[in-house]
Image: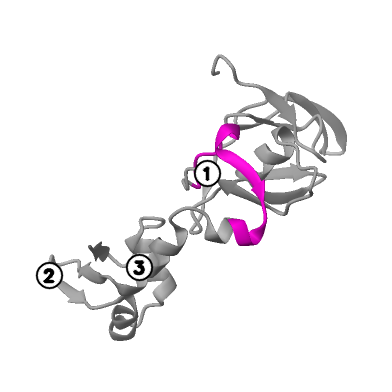
Amino acid sequence: MKYDEQWKDIEEYEGLYQVSNYGEVRSLDRQQTHIINGKERTMNLKGKVLSKINTADGYHYVALSKEGNLVPHRISRLVAQAFIPNPDNLPQVNHMDEDRKNNHVGNLEWCTAKYNNNYGNRKAKIINSLSVMLKVTFKDGSYEVYSSRAEASEKLGISKGSISRWANGHTKCRRGMKFEYLR
Protein backbone atom coordinates (compact mmCIF):
# COMPACT_ATOMS: atom_id res chain seq x y z
CA MET A 1 0.00 0.00 0.00
CA LYS A 2 1.24 3.47 -0.87
CA TYR A 3 1.82 5.81 2.07
CA ASP A 4 -0.91 8.30 1.09
CA GLU A 5 -3.33 5.86 -0.54
CA GLN A 6 -6.96 6.45 0.43
CA TRP A 7 -9.85 4.05 -0.13
CA LYS A 8 -13.55 4.86 -0.56
CA ASP A 9 -16.61 2.69 -1.06
CA ILE A 10 -17.81 2.37 -4.64
CA GLU A 11 -21.31 3.78 -5.07
CA GLU A 12 -23.93 1.01 -5.32
CA TYR A 13 -21.30 -1.51 -4.10
CA GLU A 14 -20.91 -0.24 -0.52
CA GLY A 15 -19.53 -2.96 1.77
CA LEU A 16 -18.42 -5.03 -1.23
CA TYR A 17 -15.81 -2.99 -3.14
CA GLN A 18 -13.64 0.08 -2.69
CA VAL A 19 -11.54 2.23 -5.05
CA SER A 20 -8.33 4.08 -4.17
CA ASN A 21 -7.04 7.48 -5.20
CA TYR A 22 -4.24 5.55 -6.99
CA GLY A 23 -6.70 3.71 -9.27
CA GLU A 24 -6.72 0.37 -7.47
CA VAL A 25 -9.96 -1.52 -6.80
CA ARG A 26 -10.39 -4.09 -4.04
CA SER A 27 -13.05 -6.40 -2.73
CA LEU A 28 -13.71 -6.34 1.00
CA ASP A 29 -13.72 -9.19 3.51
CA ARG A 30 -17.23 -10.65 3.61
CA GLN A 31 -19.32 -13.70 4.32
CA GLN A 32 -21.25 -15.57 1.67
CA THR A 33 -23.93 -18.16 2.29
CA HIS A 34 -24.46 -21.05 -0.13
CA ILE A 35 -26.63 -24.14 -0.07
CA ILE A 36 -24.46 -27.20 -0.64
CA ASN A 37 -26.06 -30.66 -0.70
CA GLY A 38 -29.20 -29.22 0.88
CA LYS A 39 -27.30 -27.62 3.78
CA GLU A 40 -26.66 -23.95 4.28
CA ARG A 41 -22.95 -23.13 4.48
CA THR A 42 -21.37 -19.79 5.29
CA MET A 43 -17.97 -19.03 3.84
CA ASN A 44 -15.58 -16.28 4.90
CA LEU A 45 -14.10 -14.59 1.83
CA LYS A 46 -10.93 -12.54 2.13
CA GLY A 47 -10.83 -9.22 0.29
CA LYS A 48 -8.17 -8.58 -2.35
CA VAL A 49 -7.00 -6.06 -4.94
CA LEU A 50 -8.72 -6.91 -8.21
CA SER A 51 -6.92 -7.59 -11.47
CA LYS A 52 -7.33 -4.93 -14.12
CA ILE A 53 -8.80 -5.86 -17.48
CA ASN A 54 -6.96 -4.32 -20.45
CA THR A 55 -9.20 -3.73 -23.43
CA ALA A 56 -8.72 -2.67 -27.04
CA ASP A 57 -9.79 0.89 -26.25
CA GLY A 58 -6.75 1.33 -23.99
CA TYR A 59 -8.64 1.79 -20.71
CA HIS A 60 -8.43 -0.31 -17.54
CA TYR A 61 -11.63 -1.97 -16.37
CA VAL A 62 -12.66 -4.17 -13.43
CA ALA A 63 -15.64 -6.50 -13.22
CA LEU A 64 -17.75 -5.99 -10.10
CA SER A 65 -20.28 -8.54 -8.90
CA LYS A 66 -23.46 -7.90 -6.93
CA GLU A 67 -26.38 -10.28 -6.47
CA GLY A 68 -25.02 -12.58 -9.17
CA ASN A 69 -24.57 -9.85 -11.78
CA LEU A 70 -21.06 -9.21 -13.09
CA VAL A 71 -20.68 -5.69 -14.53
CA PRO A 72 -17.54 -4.12 -16.10
CA HIS A 73 -16.59 -0.64 -14.87
CA ARG A 74 -13.96 1.76 -16.21
CA ILE A 75 -11.51 2.39 -13.35
CA SER A 76 -10.99 6.06 -14.25
CA ARG A 77 -14.71 6.68 -13.81
CA LEU A 78 -14.80 4.86 -10.45
CA VAL A 79 -11.90 7.01 -9.18
CA ALA A 80 -13.51 10.24 -10.40
CA GLN A 81 -16.90 9.36 -8.89
CA ALA A 82 -15.32 8.61 -5.51
CA PHE A 83 -12.75 11.41 -5.25
CA ILE A 84 -13.54 14.31 -7.63
CA PRO A 85 -16.54 16.57 -7.05
CA ASN A 86 -18.72 17.03 -10.14
CA PRO A 87 -21.09 19.91 -9.28
CA ASP A 88 -21.81 20.65 -12.97
CA ASN A 89 -22.68 16.98 -13.63
CA LEU A 90 -20.12 16.72 -16.45
CA PRO A 91 -20.44 13.41 -18.33
CA GLN A 92 -16.86 12.32 -19.12
CA VAL A 93 -13.53 11.76 -17.38
CA ASN A 94 -10.35 13.05 -19.04
CA HIS A 95 -6.84 11.67 -18.47
CA MET A 96 -4.76 14.85 -18.33
CA ASP A 97 -1.49 13.11 -19.30
CA GLU A 98 -3.35 11.26 -22.10
CA ASP A 99 -2.33 7.87 -20.64
CA ARG A 100 -5.59 5.93 -20.34
CA LYS A 101 -3.98 3.52 -17.87
CA ASN A 102 -2.90 6.25 -15.41
CA ASN A 103 -5.93 6.34 -13.14
CA HIS A 104 -4.42 8.34 -10.26
CA VAL A 105 -6.89 10.93 -9.02
CA GLY A 106 -4.41 13.75 -9.77
CA ASN A 107 -4.46 12.78 -13.46
CA LEU A 108 -8.25 12.84 -13.87
CA GLU A 109 -10.83 15.57 -14.38
CA TRP A 110 -14.53 15.75 -15.20
CA CYS A 111 -15.25 17.30 -18.61
CA THR A 112 -17.60 17.57 -21.56
CA ALA A 113 -17.36 15.28 -24.58
CA LYS A 114 -16.19 18.19 -26.75
CA TYR A 115 -13.41 19.10 -24.31
CA ASN A 116 -12.32 15.45 -24.06
CA ASN A 117 -12.26 15.01 -27.85
CA ASN A 118 -10.21 18.18 -28.40
CA TYR A 119 -7.83 17.67 -25.46
CA GLY A 120 -4.06 17.57 -25.92
CA ASN A 121 -2.57 15.63 -28.83
CA ARG A 122 -5.66 13.61 -29.71
CA LYS A 123 -6.38 15.40 -33.00
CA ALA A 124 -2.72 15.33 -34.06
CA LYS A 125 -2.52 11.59 -33.32
CA ILE A 126 -5.60 10.94 -35.44
CA ILE A 127 -4.31 13.05 -38.32
CA ASN A 128 -0.86 11.42 -38.12
CA SER A 129 -2.34 7.93 -38.08
CA LEU A 130 -4.29 8.76 -41.25
CA SER A 131 -1.46 10.33 -43.22
CA VAL A 132 1.78 8.60 -42.23
CA MET A 133 3.32 5.60 -43.91
CA LEU A 134 2.82 2.19 -42.34
CA LYS A 135 5.29 -0.69 -42.20
CA VAL A 136 3.86 -4.19 -41.85
CA THR A 137 6.28 -6.98 -40.91
CA PHE A 138 5.03 -10.51 -41.60
CA LYS A 139 5.70 -13.78 -39.72
CA ASP A 140 8.56 -14.73 -42.05
CA GLY A 141 10.39 -11.41 -41.44
CA SER A 142 9.50 -9.87 -44.79
CA TYR A 143 7.75 -6.50 -44.78
CA GLU A 144 5.76 -4.10 -46.91
CA VAL A 145 5.38 -0.34 -46.60
CA TYR A 146 2.02 1.29 -47.32
CA SER A 147 1.38 4.97 -47.98
CA SER A 148 -1.47 5.04 -45.46
CA ARG A 149 -3.53 3.01 -43.06
CA ALA A 150 -6.33 3.03 -45.65
CA GLU A 151 -4.08 1.45 -48.29
CA ALA A 152 -2.89 -1.23 -45.85
CA SER A 153 -6.49 -1.94 -44.90
CA GLU A 154 -7.56 -2.35 -48.50
CA LYS A 155 -4.61 -4.53 -49.56
CA LEU A 156 -4.55 -6.75 -46.45
CA GLY A 157 -8.32 -6.99 -45.90
CA ILE A 158 -8.01 -5.77 -42.31
CA SER A 159 -10.08 -2.97 -40.80
CA LYS A 160 -8.46 0.45 -40.35
CA GLY A 161 -9.50 0.37 -36.67
CA SER A 162 -7.61 -2.89 -36.04
CA ILE A 163 -4.53 -1.56 -37.83
CA SER A 164 -4.67 1.63 -35.76
CA ARG A 165 -4.92 -0.30 -32.46
CA TRP A 166 -1.99 -2.53 -33.43
CA ALA A 167 0.21 0.28 -34.75
CA ASN A 168 -0.47 2.43 -31.66
CA GLY A 169 0.33 -0.49 -29.36
CA HIS A 170 -3.12 -0.72 -27.73
CA THR A 171 -3.41 -4.43 -28.62
CA LYS A 172 -1.20 -7.07 -30.22
CA CYS A 173 -1.97 -8.53 -33.62
CA ARG A 174 -2.74 -12.25 -33.26
CA ARG A 175 -2.01 -12.85 -36.94
CA GLY A 176 1.75 -12.79 -36.35
CA MET A 177 2.20 -9.41 -38.04
CA LYS A 178 3.74 -6.26 -36.62
CA PHE A 179 2.39 -2.84 -37.54
CA GLU A 180 4.32 0.40 -37.06
CA TYR A 181 3.96 3.94 -38.28
CA LEU A 182 6.93 5.44 -40.11
CA ARG A 183 7.29 9.04 -39.01
Q: Tell me the number on the disc at residue 129.
A: 3
Q: Which residues are magenta?
A: 100-115
Q: Is residue 105 above or below residue 167?
A: above
**Colour pattern of the rendering:** one colour
Check disc 1: other Cα within 10 Å, few if <14, some if 14-19, many if 20+.
some
Return the residue nearer the eye: 79 or 19.
79
Residue type, label 2: Ser
Residue 168 image point, x, y percent:
36, 59
- Which quadrant holds the C terminus? bottom left
Q: Is residue 53 above or below residue 17?
A: below
Q: Earlier in the sequence, mark 3 or mark 1?
A: 1
Check disc 3: other Cα within 10 Å, few if <14, some if 14-19, many if 20+.
many
At horizontal 22% and vertical 69% (from top left) the residue drawn is 136
SS state under label 1:
loop
SS state under label 3:
helix
Residue type, label 1: Met
Q: Say left or right for 161 vs 41.
A: left
Residue marked by disc 2? 142
The reply to whether the magenta stretch includes residue 106 is yes
Q: CA distance from mark 3 to mark 1?
A: 21 Å
Q: CA distance from mark 2 to mark 3?
A: 22 Å
Residue 23 placement: quadrant = top right
Q: Nearer the viewer, mark 3 or mark 1?
A: 1
Residue 123 placement: quadrant = bottom left
- Which quadrant holds the N terminus? top right
At horizontal 60% and vertical 57% (from top left) the residue drawn is 115
Residue marked by disc 1? 96
Return the residue nearer the eye: 157 or 100.
100
Q: Say left or right for 119 vs 158.
A: right
Residue type, label 3: Ser
